[in-house]
Amino acid sequence: MASKITWRKALVTFREYLLITLGLLLYTLAWSVFLLPNNLVGGGITGLGSIIQYSTGFNVAYSYVIINSILVLIAMKVLGGGFGAKTIYALLVTGLFLRFLPGLIPQEFISNFTADNGKLMCVIFAGAMVGLGIALTFTQGGSTGGTDIIALIICKYHRVSPGTVIGVLDLVIIASSMLIPNGASISEKLLVMLYGFVLTGVVNYTLDFALNGRRQSVQLMVFTDLYEVLTDRICNEIHRGVTLLDSQGGYSKHNGKLVLVIVKRTETSKILKLIKEVDPEAFVSLDNVSEVYGKGFEPMKKP
């Protein structure tokens, strides 16, 4: 029995590291195929390393490993060593991928993607891949380190959110691309900086969607006199629970019921169609809900 449990844990661990590796592969492919060949920049330590590479020729892989190693050592001293093996693994694998992956990809393949699609499309493709890669790494307990570590250190001594710190750091790193001494005009450097901001936006959107999109739900409040019919149809056809709340019109003083229902985002069009069929004159308020726990949704998390 013990050996069976050990094998099961080993398989789970292997799967986690495999998915982390896949996420890091997506992350570094985005930089190797779309960003570095176009001399584009982004946020994070990789973005800082790319600026160093464009300015001095020092390979981004070396900058990434050196800077992150220093940050990890500082964090272990300041934060008490709260970084696990997965984070160290992710940092080392990313450094190796950044160093050797560009040499393994045929130049013709890279040229077809970068030259034929233009820089804007390259930024969009890269942002989606980077966001998906980071999300995949996060879900398995890994981390790409970098500005995340700086944010944790700053937040220990100052009352500010980590997201704000990371956003400001990315802004500063991307803006520093204006200092690259590559002979480009001011307008060209501004364009590169703007591409960097677009990249950050796409990365954040993809990351948020990948991590939370599956769990996102919609809360509807429906004001209708046909609440009994609507409640029956929602329960029988959508198979969702409904809460009826007493309501009163502020102007009309008309007493009625407010229909409150929460559904998965994918069910939104179905329930809106049903509401329109029951009462085309219904007043509907719709709000996004990031997380819902209970029967039919996500199980309650442990405290």
Image (tube, rainbow, N blue to C red):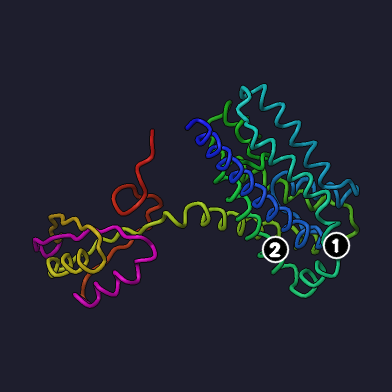
Q: Verify whether residue 279 appears in magenta.
A: yes
**Eyeballing the image, is 264 above or below 153?**
below
| Residue at image location 66% in from the left, 43% down from the top | 144
Q: Name the residue under label 1.
A: 185
Q: Earlier in the sequence, mark 2 or mark 1?
A: 2
Question: Above or below — where is 172 with respect to 39?
Answer: above
Q: Quadrant of residue 264?
A: bottom left
Q: State which quadrant residue 124 falls in.
A: bottom right
Q: Give the range drawn in magenta.
A: 251-280
Tell me the crowding category of disc 2: few under 14, some 14 to 19, or many 20 or more residues within 10 angstroms, Cα based.
Answer: many
- Image coordinates for residue 215, horizontal then vertical, percent: 42, 54
Q: Residue 151 carries which label?
A: none
Q: Which residue is drawn at 12% across and 55% down?
A: 246
Q: What element carries label 2?
A: helix
The percent position of residue 108, horizontal first and vertical second, equals 85, 70
Q: Which of 235 and 271 is in front in this view?
A: 235
Question: The C terminus lies in which quarter of the figure?
Answer: top left
- At label 2, the amino acid type is Val
Q: Give the foreground label among 2 and 1.
A: 2
Give the Cα distance between marks 2 and 1.
21 Å
> Is 261 displayed left or right of 216 in the figure?
left
Question: Which of 49 and 141 lies nearest the eye of the viewer?
Answer: 141
Magenta segment: does it hold 4? no
Note whether 254 is above or below 56 in the view shown: below
Count of numbered badges drawn on the protein:
2
Q: In this view, does 220 lie above or below 171?
A: below
Q: Give residue 290's position: percent from left, percent from top.
A: 41, 52
- Could you tell me the amino acid type at mark 1? Ser
Residue holding disc 2: 123
